[in-house]
Image (spheres, grey):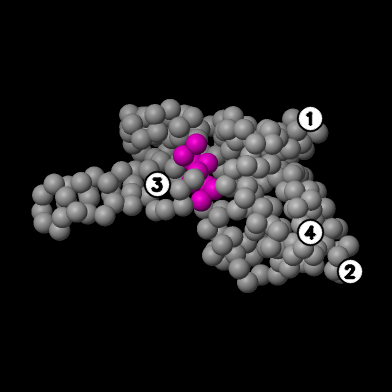
Amino acid sequence: MSNGPDGGFIPLSMSVGVGERADTERADAARNRRLLLAAAQNLIDNHGAAAVTMDAVAREAGVGKGTVFRRFGSRTGLMFALLDHSESEIQRAYISGPQPLGPGAPPLDRLLAYGRARLKLTSSHLDILLEAGGAGGDFMNHPVWSASNRHVQILLHQLGFGDRLDVISVAVQSPLNAAAVKHLVEVAGLDLETITAEWEEMVRTLARGVTGD
């Protein structure tokens, strides 16, 4: 997944002409992409992922449906782009964003904030994550897992869990993945708020076992 800015075009010419037109077109495309992704995310936040259709996104963004199709090709293409964008956002947030998800907050607060953010992302993009392989173990071979796992292991180490963190980091993150969320929602009948609360209590209990607080 790319973590770079949208439309990272470096103009080849400073003169008025083809270079300038290309620069403008690239900037317009980047703005359109951000507008459409924001519209899709707004629909998810307010109405759930099922509400994200090409027609609905076009209406929400105030553009023609053809613009959405030209940019993403299909609903699946749109959802993958939104997933990529959301993943980039959560990574930026825990690397350099504001507290408690970002640096500076106590490690337990940061870990809880990360879990909340990850569960929200997983719930919002559950269908596309399952389609992309989130229901099996292959997701652990993805760079997204590597980056997230490293972040969680750093926080666990800061909490006092020591240096052998492979098992505990997987245990902490397992309820956050797509397969687990699907089971908890569809089989156990839990909503996202309950899943989040129970996950937080699990993490707090584990932390108390180490810190004694």
Which residues are the magenta region?
80-88
Which quadrant is home to the C terminus? bottom right
Please name the predominant secondary structure of the magenta segment in the image.
helix
The residue to which callout 4 is attached is 164
Q: Is residue 145 left or right of residue 174?
A: left
Q: Is residue 193 left or right of residue 124?
A: right
Specify few, some or many for label 2: CA neighbours under 10 Å numbering under 14, 14-19, or 20 or more. Answer: few
Q: CA distance from mark 4 to mark 2?
A: 19 Å
Q: Nearer the viewer, mark 4 or mark 2?
A: 4
Kind of element beneath mark 2 = loop
The residue to which callout 2 is attached is 212
What amino acid is found at the position of numbered circle 4 in the picture? Arg
What amino acid is found at the position of numbered circle 2 in the picture? Gly
Looking at the image, which is closer to me, 65 or 173?
Answer: 173
- Residue at image coords 56%, 53%: 90
Q: Looking at the picture, does residue 106 appear above or below residue 10?
A: below
Q: Nearer the viewer, mark 2 or mark 3?
A: 2
Looking at the image, which is closer to me, 189 or 105?
Answer: 105
